[in-house]
Amino acid sequence: MNPPPISLDERRRRLAALEAAMQAQGIAACLIDATSSLRYFTGLSWHASERLTGAVVRPGKPLTYITPRFELDKVGSIIGVPGEILTWEEHESPFRLVADLIGPNGKVAVDQQARVFIWLGLAEALGADRLVGADPLIVPLRARKSQAEIALMTRAKALTLEAHRRAHESLQAGVKASEVVAFIDRQHRALGADGGNTFCIVSFGLDTSLPHGGEGDPELQDGDVVLIDTGCALDGYSADITRTYVFGEPSTEVRRIWDLEHQAQAAAFDAARLGAPCEAVDAAARAVLTANGLGPDYQLPGLPHRTGHGIGLDVHEAPNLVRGDRTPLDVGMCFSNEPMIVVPGRFGIRLEDHFHMTADGPKWFTQPQPSLDEPFRGVEPLVA
């Protein structure tokens, strides 16, 4: 059974925390665009378009939504946290509406995922010198997940792991990568995810050496390395799991690289300690690879990207497990752990699971792949 969605009370607590942070930093208003942050704070999930629909948060004042007049009825029917709704007609400027609401004084924080035209429109209406980025307000709140968020992600990842298991069982020589993508989508839907795959990369053979897969639609051949990276969502909260194995008998070199990947993933997990900087996790994974003749740094054969990313309503969100990110690891933070090894022109191995930080240290959402030959050993079949 799926966990309950995020409650109205939790969203109100998030808004109260945002307002407190705004007051502490001397921010008069915060504009949130139709991004995942709008859903995080208000419960309104809206497809971004060329028209501004968003929310303005002001400490001690009513939550205010901004939307085109012709969208009023729809927006009013799907908002989570109640608030006033201001509208603009097609010939009017929504940025002038925002400026009139906020007034002539004070700094205005702008959602840093907002589209450029929104920043430019606000700069013209308010003055560019009044605008600051909202990440210092928003990221620390979103990075530390509540128990309700952890529960949703735990279930979403369980659904994705089961979709992986079923896909592995279904593989046959000659199947196309696109057919496996469609199969996984059906499994996610049958298992009760929000709606199929949020994304799905299925790579065979040489395509596994490309971190985000190739552009063709190859057929599975005996001896191919198989890399599947996919996820789903529950109440918007994301799963993102990668499994790598071989259809047939692995070569000695594939076994060696798979074992190193497994070691690097374990070293990264062991380095995730409360108070340690995010970059320490990345360094631990790279140390394993360098000690075994891979890399160094981003050189190939080796690890071409960061070891991991934050996850929540966005599949990729701050902070990240990468050199230069010195954010201290704290309770509630959630990360992927995926120190992929690429052997150019031959194959790639990525094992990706996620963990969250607890008062006792890191805790896996899903247990890492136990072996190359038995990738789903110990995984109990899940029934929706």
Image: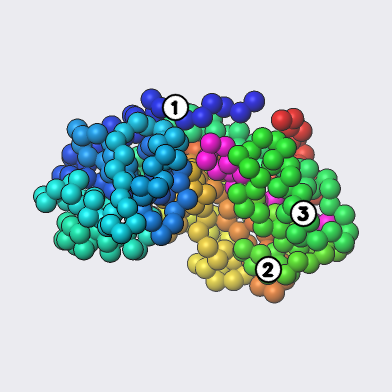
Instruction: Using residue 98 as the reference point, say whether residue 312 is left or right of it.
Output: right
Closer to us: 237 or 344: 237
Mark 1, other Cα within 10 Å: few <14 / some 14–19 / many ≥20: few
Could you tell me the amino acid type at mark 2? Gly
Which region shows up in magenta? 232-248
Residue at the spot 47% in from the left edge and 50% down from the top edge:
47
Dot in front, 2 or 1: 1
Question: Measured from the top left, where is residue 194 in percent x and y?
Answer: 60, 39
Residue at the spot 27% in from the left edge and 57% down from the top edge:
93
Quarter occupied by residue 143: top left
Q: Find numbered disc 3 in the image and state the secondary structure of the residue it sits on.
A: helix
269 versus 116 height, above or below: above
Mark 3, other Cα within 10 Å: few <14 / some 14–19 / many ≥20: many
Disc 2 target residue: 214
Image quadrant where one finds the C terminus: top right
Q: Find numbered disc 2 in the image and state the secondary structure of the residue it sits on.
A: loop
Closer to us: 375 or 132: 132
Residue at the spot 34% in from the left edge and 33% down from the top edge:
14
Disc 3 target residue: 180
Q: Main secondary structure of the magenta part?
A: strand
Q: Would you say residue 6 sits in the magenta stretch?
A: no
Which one is earlier in the sequence, the residue at label 2 or at label 1? 1
Which one is earlier in the sequence, the residue at label 3 or at label 1? 1
Disc 1 target residue: 7
Q: Would you say residue 244 sits in the magenta stretch?
A: yes
Which one is earlier in the sequence, the residue at label 2 or at label 3? 3
Could you tell me the amino acid type at mark 1? Ser
Instruction: Using residue 131 as the reference point, say whether residue 347 is left or right of it.
Output: right
Question: Measured from the top left, where is residue 135 in percent x and y?
Answer: 32, 50
